[in-house]
Amino acid sequence: MNRRSMLWAAVSSIGAGLAGARTAAALADESPSPKLKVVYHLNDLDRVQFVLGNIQDHYDGVGGPDNVTIALVIHGPALRAFHLASANPDFTSRFSHLSKAGLQPAACGNTMKAQNVRLAELQPGFVSADRGGVVLIAELQSQGYLYLRP
């Protein structure tokens, strides 16, 4: 066997090994991934309907709430949309549907104080982020939640 033949055999072996490694990596990527966790950040009143639509689209896009955990952290002016006293029936129905699907809404405790609103005065399902909405967002991110601010 001459040098050229030996070099060709070595290169072919390395190429086959790399191809096998790529195939194994591709198969590993097809294994089920852990459930995705996402936190949506909402503070603009004029974006409330848009963000709720994004959340519904997110559930639909991943095949339903069994495939994703979604938290919604609200502070600032956007919290006004979730006051029971000012919500219209269509909004209440839409939000209730998302909550029943598993949405985890949290209201910033600082915003609640500023707006003089109690948890019982918000749409059902809310929890209070007593140390603040931005603190909760950072904590969720440290737990592996992906941050979205549409």
Image (cartoon, rainbow, N blue to C red):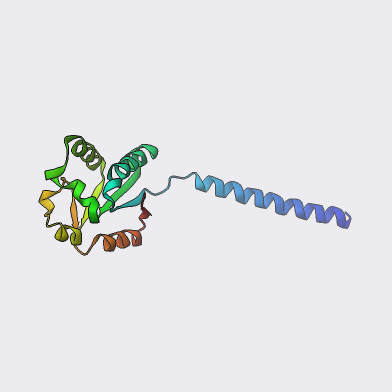
In this view of the protein, which residue sits in the foreground, 36 or 116?
116
Which quadrant holds residue 49? Answer: top left
Which quadrant holds residue 87? Answer: top left
State how many labels appear: 0
Position of residue 108 measured from the top left corner of the image (x, y, whole percent)? 21, 58
In this view of the protein, which residue sits in the foreground, 113 or 142?
113
Residue lying at 81% horizontally and 52% vertically, measured from the top left: 8
Is 9 left or right of 132, judged from the image as shown? right
Is 115 left or right of 145, judged from the image as shown? left
In this view of the protein, which residue sits in the foreground, 111 or 103?
111
Position of residue 64 measured from the top left corner of the image (x, y, whole percent)? 33, 38
In this view of the protein, which residue sits in the foreground, 142 or 52?
52
Position of residue 60 measured from the top left corner of the image (x, y, whole percent)? 36, 37
Q: Relative to 130, does residue 19 appear above or below in the rendering?
A: above
Of the 4 image quadrants, the one containing the N terminus is bottom right
Position of residue 89 measured from the top left corner of the image (x, y, whole percent)? 17, 35
Specify the farthest residue to the right: 2
